[in-house]
Image (spheres, helix red, strand yellow):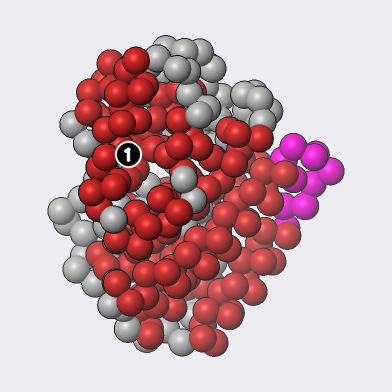
C-alpha cells in the first residue's frame, strides 16, 4: 500500500537528486529544468484520470510516484551522455531503473510488489506498444502514466516548436535534421491510424508527426478532450512543411480525434 507519507518521502528524494545536478552550463541547466518541470506536470495530469481509470487511493498515489520518477534516467542521460536520443545502449528507461534499484531510500520505502509495478511502468512507459507480458497490477497505472506523459510532451513540444526556430534546443529535437522530407513509413503508419515507430524517423518533421500520432494510442476520453482543448494537433501541424501528404495526415488525425470526443 502506498500512502501520502511514502509519496512525500519519494518527492523529497527526487528534489534532492535533481538539485545534485546543479551546473554553470546554461544549456544543461535549462534541459534539467525542462525534465524536472515535465515530471511534475505529469504528476499533476494523473489527477485528470482518477475517475475514468477507477484507481484506488493507493494506486492513485503509486501512479503519481511513477509519474514523478518515469524520466529519472533523463538527468543522467543528459549529463553523462549529452543526449535525449534513446538508443539500444543508452535508454533513459533502463538508466532510470538501474538508478532506482540502487537507491536505498526508495527501495526501503516500497514493498516488493509496489517496486515491481514502479519498475514495470518505467520500463514500458515509452514503448510503442505495451508488451502482452505486462503484469495485470501494473497495467491500469501504466495506461494512465502513458496518456499523462504523452499529453505533457505534446504540450511541451507544441509550445517549443511554435516559439522557437529549429535548432534552438538541439537536444529536445534529438539532434535530428530539419528538412521538409517525410518518410514513407511515417505517412503509412498515420494513414493506418498507428503510432509511428521510432525506427522510421529520419528527420525533425517525422519526429513531430510521431508525437502527433500518439493520439492513436490514447486510452482515455479525457486525453482526447485535453488534446482537443489545447489544440495540440493544429499547433504541431502549423510547424510542419505545407505538403499534400502532411495535409492528408493532419486530416486523418483530426477526424480520428473528433470521433473520440
Ligand atoms: Fe516523460
Does the stretch in magenta take in 22?
yes
* Left/right of residue 163 with respect to residue 220 in the rendered view: right
* Relative height, residue 260 to residue 140 (above, below): above
* Relative height, residue 227 to residue 137 (above, below): above
Query: Residue 194 or 1: which is nearer the viewer?
Result: 194
* Left/right of residue 172 with respect to residue 243 in the rendered view: right
The image quadrant where one finds the C terminus is bottom left
Q: Residue at x 47, y 13 (%)?
A: 180
Label 1 crowd (10 A; few <14 / some 14-19 / many >=20) = some
Q: Residue at x 52, y 27 (%)?
A: 239
Does the stretch in magenta take in 105?
no
Residue 8 % position (x, y): 58, 80
Inspect this view and state whether residue 146 appears. Answer: no
Residue 189 % position (x, y): 24, 29
- Magenta residues span 20-29
> Disc 1 marks which residue?
254
Amino acid at each position: 500500500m502506498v500512502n501520502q507519507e511514502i509519496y512525500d518521502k519519494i518527492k523529497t528524494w527526487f528534489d534532492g537528486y535533481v538539485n545534485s545536478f546543479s551546473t554553470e552550463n546554461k544549456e544543461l541547466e535549462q534541459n534539467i529544468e525542462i525534465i524536472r518541470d515535465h515530471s511534475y506536470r505529469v504528476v499533476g495530469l494523473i489527477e485528470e484520470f482518477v475517475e475514468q481509470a477507477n484507481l484506488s487511493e493507493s494506486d492513485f498515489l503509486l501512479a503519481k510516484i511513477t509519474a514523478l520518477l518515469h524520466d529519472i534516467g533523463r538527468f543522467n542521460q543528459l549529463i553523462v551522455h549529452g543526449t535525449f536520443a534513446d538508443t539500444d545502449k543508452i535508454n533513459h528507461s533502463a538508466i532510470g531503473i538501474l538508478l532506482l534499484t540502487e537507491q536505498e531510500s526508495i527501495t526501503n520505502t516500497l514493498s516488493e510488489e509496489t517496486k515491481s509495478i514502479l519498475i514495470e511502468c518505467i520500463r514500458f512507459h515509452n514503448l510503442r506498444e505495451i508488451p502482452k507480458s505486462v503484469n495485470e497490477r501494473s497495467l491500469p497505472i501504466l495506461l494512465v502514466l502513458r496518456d499523462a506523459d504523452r499529453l505533457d510532451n505534446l504540450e511541451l513540444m507544441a509550445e517549443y516548436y511554435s516559439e522557437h526556430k529549429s535548432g534552438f534546443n538541439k537536444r529536445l529535437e534529438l539532434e535530428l535534421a530539419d528538412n521538409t522530407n517525410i518518410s514513407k513509413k511515417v505517412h503509412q503508419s498515420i494513414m493506418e491510424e498507428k503510432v509511428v515507430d521510432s525506427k522510421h524517423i529520419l528527420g525533425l518533421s517525422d519526429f513531430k508527426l510521431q508525437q502527433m500520432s500518439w493520439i492513436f494510442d490514447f486510452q482515455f476520453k479525457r486525453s482526447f478532450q485535453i488534446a482537443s482543448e489545447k489544440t495540440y494537433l493544429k499547433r504541431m501541424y502549423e510547424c510542419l512543411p505545407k505538403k499534400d501528404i502532411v495535409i492528408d495526415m493532419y486530416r486523418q488525425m483530426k477526424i480520428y480525434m473528433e470521433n473520440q470526443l
